[in-house]
Image (cartoon, rainbow, N blue to C red):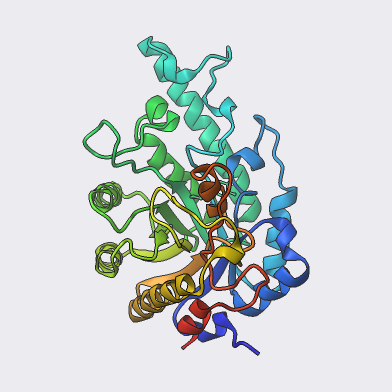
Amino acid sequence: EAPSLEARYEESFNIGAAVEPYQLDGIQGEVLKRHYSSIVAENVMKPINIQPEEGTFNFEEADKIVQFAKENDMELRFHTLIWHSQVPEWFFLDKNGNQMVEETDPKQREKNKKLLLKRLEKHIKTVVKRYKDDINSWDVVNEVIDEYAPNDRGLRESPWYQIAGDDYIKVAFETARKYAGEDAKLYINDYNTEVEPKRTYLYNLVTDLLEQGVPIDGVGHQSHIQIGWPSLQETEESINMFAELGLDNQITELDVSLYGWPPTPAYDTYEDIPAFEFERQADRYDQLFELYERLDDKISNVTFWGIADNHTWLDDRAEDYNNGVGKDAPFVFDIDYNVKPAYWEIID
Ligand code: XIL
């Protein structure tokens, strides 16, 4: 039988997987229990699912994941308190149903900012109070950096930013700390954290927030990566940069796509993917985990954005860019939950 992945890395960091509640049963549940020591909700803890309408909180699906983690003594990451995507529109509408981003009157803009921050605080307070004893690490804000943003700090000009300025980031962390307590680990999570100029934008923002006393404990590196990109050197530099600020690092959404960006051309089906692709991918995973292990005092969790190749958000992207037909295969378990070459490389 294949050795357990979590046991292999027990000394170094937790090994996690993103899940939907329906994946907790049957064979997927068994794979989770055997190979992973941490889980995170792929979707059900996002604002659109937790508070679809103002004041209406829906915890049913999220609770299933919390329950599974408890029963199996697994770590639980929370993803995500605040994000510009998968957030219900009501957050950004004023009391008359108008888009707050379009408001031009300065007085009304002040009021709108207050209203939005009040909503943000209420959301965070309600969620954090409910789960504070169950969650080890929280993604407080997600993807707040956008290197293409038209401001010189690379701050994403989401509705949050357009309505509340960068204060929303600070208020989010302070509110999370207030209700989660001193022991909670609070993360700023983003993608492409390895590459310039994004990592410098992120670094400057984090430094600035730390100087203001904003309670940040770590950086979440999503790590939606490719076989040949980004480089190991950039990856290592990024982890070291944040560690030098006294912060923890977590790899929060790891997947290694077979494709470049955009993912075209893509193989039509799983059966079309030739063995050499899995060998190339295995080399990449080998190098990556060698790096993570070497830096293990700076990394506390490595989470894959899924369990096995049968279910990955990358398929949507492969399909979108290839006229509706395309399959990716980013994990170390195949579509039948059997181990792949990449699995053996990271076990060895
Ligand atoms: C993705 C999920 O995997 C999809 O099921 C959903 O349709 C869209 O969101 N960065 C993130 C994750 O922080 O929340 C995203 O998850 C993937 C990119």
Q: Residue at x 69, y 52 (%)?
A: 62
Q: Is residue 321 left or right of residue 32?
A: left
> Quarter holding the N terminus?
bottom right
Q: Quadrant of residue 70?
A: bottom right
Q: Position of residue 22 (x, y in %)?
A: 74, 58
Q: Residue furthest right?
A: 26
Q: Position of residue 83 (x, y in %)?
A: 48, 41
> Is 149 drawn above or below residue 268 in the view shown?
above
Q: Residue at x 48, y 53 (%)?
A: 139
Residue 177 visible in the shown view: no
Q: Residue at x 21, y 36 (%)?
A: 152
Residue 239 visible in the shown view: yes
Q: Residue at x 54, y 20 (%)?
A: 93
- Residues 143 and 192: in front is 192
Q: Position of residue 78 (x, y in %)?
A: 56, 56
Q: Position of residue 169 (x, y in %)?
A: 39, 41
Q: Quadrant of residue 58?
A: top right
- Residues 180 and 262: in front is 262
> Count of labels shown?
0
- Residues 96 and 183: in front is 96
- Residues 282 and 111: in front is 282
> Is 216 drawn above or below residue 4 in the view shown?
above
> Is 119 drawn above or below residue 237 in the view shown?
above
